[in-house]
Amino acid sequence: MRYRLIQPLAFLLSCFSLGNATAAEVQVAVAANFTAPIQAIAKDFEKDTGHKLVAVYGATGQFYTQIKNGAPFEVFLSADDTTPAKLEKEGDAVPGSRFTYAIGTLVLWSAQDGYVDTKGEVLKTGQYKHLSIANPKTAPYGLAATQVLDKLGLASAVKPKLVEGQNITQALQFVSSGNAELGFVALSQVYKDGKITSGSAWIVPADMHEPIKQDALILKKGEANPAAQALVDYLKGPKAAEVIKSYGYQL
């Protein structure tokens, strides 16, 4: 009788030990605009798979340089589709692992209520001292911002007012701190569950700039890591999709 009572417990303990043995850690380079969503996704990912996600946030162009210089990233969540495609072509990624995990939205935002109108006409008034954008050479959202300014015919007029952040997080910080009255940032940074979380904003129409297709892929360093494949699979699943859409991204 004693053996029969202990056997189920021993079986459960052996399964628990096996689960721990197969759990792994994945090093992920994450575009700064996707900080909040991946933090939310990571909690469910770790709970559902047992794997641990370790993220570093920054500008896509800077990540490219770091990856080429041997940074230990295993999965890359880019803010564009051209950089992952380039890494794939250059042999730095697992072939066939690249996919679009989100399509980003650009927004003109101010921390002040009522400062930005719903059509972005505030840009044409010129009554602001500083306009924050991310570095267009390394951050796709910064590049999209310059395309919008070009389309509006304002590039030359606002050039003396531009304040560039190294990435989209720093561009947001300039506006949040009041160092810039307004700025072009990612909608995901100021949006949650169908509404702008604070301040005032103009959601830029998608046809005013090139699509911000954000691709992910498994890098060569993650080829043998089961947690890397698990994360990519999880990002394609319904739980992750729900989180991604809640931050204003398209799928």
Image (spheres, rainbow, N blue to C red):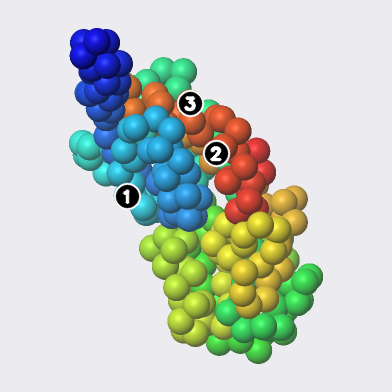
Label 3 is placed on what type of residue? Answer: Asp
Label 2 is placed on what type of residue? Answer: Ala
The answer to whether residue 108 is seen in the rendering is no
Q: Are marks 1 and 2 in contact (CB under 8 Å)?
A: no
Label 1 crowd (10 A; few <14 / some 14-19 / many >=20): some
Q: Residue at x 33, y 46 (%)?
A: 55
Residue of label 1: 56
Q: Are marks 1 and 3 in contact (CB under 8 Å)?
A: no
Judge from the rendering whether residue 3 lies leftward or rightward of residue 152; answer left or right. Answer: left
Dividing the image into 4 quarters, which one contains the N terminus? Answer: top left
Label 3 crowd (10 A; few <14 / some 14-19 / many >=20): few
Residue of label 3: 233
Q: Residue at x 39, y 30 (%)?
A: 49
Nearer the viewer's eye, disc 1 or disc 2? 2
Q: Is residue 224 above or below residue 117?
A: above
Dividing the image into 4 quarters, which one contains the C terminus? Answer: top right
Rendered location of residue 97, percent (x, y): 45, 22
Gap in Å between the C-alphas at discs 3 and 2?
10 Å
The local secondary structure at tag 1 comes to strand
**Earlier sequence position, callout 1 versus callout 3:** 1
Rendered location of residue 158, percent (x, y): 60, 76
The local secondary structure at tag 3 comes to helix
Residue of label 2: 240
Rendered location of residue 73, percent (x, y): 28, 37
Judge from the rendering whether residue 193 lies leftward or rightward of residue 57; answer left or right. Answer: right
Label 1 is placed on what type of residue? Answer: Val
